[in-house]
Amino acid sequence: MARTATAKIAISVIGNLLNTLTDSNLVKVQFQNVITHNLANGLGDDQIDIGWESADRTISDGSNEDLNLFDLSGLDLGAGSGLDPLGQSVAMTELALLYINNRSAAVLTIGGAASNELTAIFAAAGDKIKIPAWGQLLLIAPKNAGFAVTTTTDALRIAASGAAATYDIIVLGRSG
């Protein structure tokens, strides 16, 4: 049986901005934005056919790991190295979603792999994104182009500094 994948992404930001004026009157501004993406199975716009999650990943302080997003080589998600959680091989060519949840006091630095660096999510090779302690990173590119992943631009480096790190990662994409 062929692998199929679907996902629903829902983000809700609701808040209030309050200010008490010098005459004791209260001014209130409310804001609300709800974003949803329903991703069906397939290879086109708003579709995915690959997905995986890895929870409770750990990196010691001052260390890093490079995750191969193209074919998962060297990565064991429970069904063996280089296989998705269902035990099937993967060849991701488009990244549609990257979610990293830093569940520690460490700072996570994303990017800057020494070789085969995943560059599509950055402005230039060598660029990096820092996720502060207890912070999160979410990148969504649901349309057909997504973020390009190839056999030579597939390594997502995740480094820890300031403390040992624990993080979760979710990756959704297309095999092109």
Image: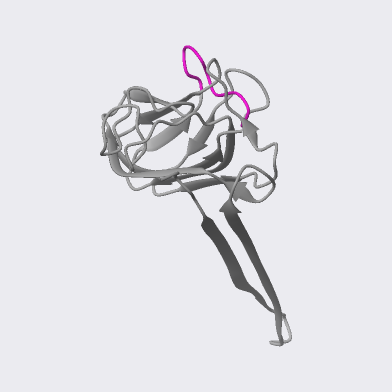
User: The N terminus lies in which quarter of the figure?
Assistant: top left
In this view, 96 is above or below 121:
below
- The residue lying at 52 percent from left, 31 percent from top is 92
Secondary structure mainly formed by the magenta segment: loop
Is the C terminus in the top left, top right, bottom left or bottom right quadrant? Answer: top right
Q: Position of residue 114 (x, y in %)?
A: 46, 12
Query: Relative to residue 32, is residue 136 drawn left or right?
Result: left
Q: Residue at x 73, y 86 (%)?
A: 23
Farthest front residue in view: 1
In the depicted structure, whether residue 31 falls above or below residue 106: below
- The percent position of residue 116, horizontal first and vertical second, equals 51, 15
Relative image position of residue 113 (x, y in whole percent)? 47, 18
Residue 170 visible (yes or no)? no
The answer to whether residue 149 is above or below residue 32 is: above
In the image, the segment drawn in magenta is 112-121
Please tell me which residue is depicted at 50% across the width and 20% down the height of the picture. 112
Asked whether 116 falls inside the magenta stretch, the response is yes
Judge by depth and name the residue closer to the eye, 74 or 138: 74
